[in-house]
């Protein structure tokens, strides 16, 4: 699989001089199998740039959502393929406590956006999954619940003999009831070739942000070590985290096993 990052920032877009290298767009990641099949993870503002690249053909696009918080769906109204006549777009929502499977389209009602979902010329269908494991073309997908306000889904995805996990907006040690225990996380990500995991906070952010639904960078690193992950990508960077600070974090883990990488817009990895 090829993995390309189009948005890596958590909570809110952060354009500016201090975020140019790592990027200020909110989450969006593209997976591409060896045969060329594609799977989009989340629809933050990073999906706008991806959309421009996907206008060249009219094949069906599949968008897999982690959850409905604003920073993970706010780019969809600016997703150019949604304005292509007849372009098939399948949206698979994550777990939601309220059952709001169509929140990504509801954000485009007249109070919030000038173009309503009914005016989009593309062929959009929302298909909630009843099971937690299914096959989607080349991709074998498994999911479990995030420890995040309102819940959501993490995904373990296998293709071409390789496996990656996408675990964003997840609190490994939540003060409230766990939807997925740490022991279950160890099992869920065990041995993956690539783990993309939430690392929005540092120790200095606590205890003020305890229960907000994100993990410490150090917690994600320990999880990756114990789960024997081959490579860890720290994702969902805090809006206040500058390029220089992310460089310093990366330096702390330089030479460590597994390899630890700070997610960066435009970064391409293979697993």
Image (tube, rainbow, N blue to C red):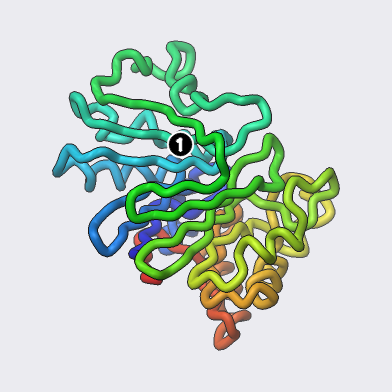
Which sits in the foreground, 249 or 17? 249
Quarter of the image where one finds residue 167: bottom right
53 with respect to 250 (left or right): left
Quarter of the image where one finds residue 47: top left
Q: Considering the numbered disc 1 on the image, is that residue within a helix, a strand or a loop?
A: strand
Image location of residue 232, percent across then percent down: 55, 71
Q: Where 19 sits versus 213, above or below?
A: below
Which sits in the foreground, 214 or 40? 40
Point out the image quarter for the N terminus: bottom left
Image location of residue 91, percent across then percent down: 41, 34
Image location of residue 11, percent across then percent down: 58, 44
What residue is at 68 percent from the left and 30 percent from the top?
A: 97
Q: Where 205 sits versus 128, above or below?
A: below
Res 239 visible = no
Image location of residue 215, percent across then percent down: 70, 57
247 with respect to 176 (left or right): left
Q: Badge 1: few (under 14), some or many (20 or more) residues near its Cα, within 10 Å?
A: many
What residue is at 36 percent from the left and 70 percent from the top?
A: 270
Which sits in the foreground, 140 or 29? 140
Quarter of the image where one finds residue 2: bottom left
Q: Where 110 sits versus 99, above or below?
A: above
Task: Report the residue marked by disc 1.
Answer: 92
Res 226 visible = yes
Point out the image quarter for the C terminus: bottom left
What residue is at 71 percent from the left and 47 percent from the top?
A: 147
The residue at the far left in this view is 56
The residue at the far bottom in this view is 255
């Amino acid at each position: 699989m090829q993995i390309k990052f189009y948005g890596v920032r958590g909570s809110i877009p952060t354009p500016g001089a201090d975020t140019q290298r790592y990027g200020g767009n909110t989450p969006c990641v593209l997976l591409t199998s060896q045969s060329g099949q594609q799977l989009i993870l989340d629809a933050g503002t990073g999906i706008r740039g991806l959309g421009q690249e996907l206008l060249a053909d009219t094949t069906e696009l599949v968008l897999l959502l982690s959850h409905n918080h604003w920073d993970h769906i706010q780019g969809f109204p600016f997703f150019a393929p949604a304005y292509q006549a007849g372009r098939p777009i399948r949206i698979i929502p994550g777990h939601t406590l309220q059952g709001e499977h169509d929140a990504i389209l509801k954000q485009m009602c007249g109070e919030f956006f000038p173009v309503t979902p009914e005016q989009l010329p593309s062929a959009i269908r929302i298909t909630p999954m009843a099971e937690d494991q299914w096959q989607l073309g080349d991709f074998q997908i498994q999911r479990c619940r995030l420890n995040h306000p309102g819940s959501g889904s993490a995904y373990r995805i296998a293709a071409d003999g390789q496996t990656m996990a996408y675990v964003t907006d997840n609190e490994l040690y939540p003060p409230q009831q766990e939807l997925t225990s740490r022991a279950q996380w160890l099992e869920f990500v065990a041995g993956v070739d690539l783990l993309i995991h939430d690392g929005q906070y540092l120790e200095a952010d606590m205890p003020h942000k305890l229960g907000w639904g994100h993990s410490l960078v150090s917690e994600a690193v320990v999880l990756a070590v114990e789960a024997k992950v081959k490579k860890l990508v720290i994702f969902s960077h805090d809006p206040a985290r500058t390029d220089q600070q992310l460089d310093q974090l990366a330096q702390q883990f330089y030479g460590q096993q597994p390899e630890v990488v700070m997610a960066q817009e435009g970064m391409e990895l293979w697993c």
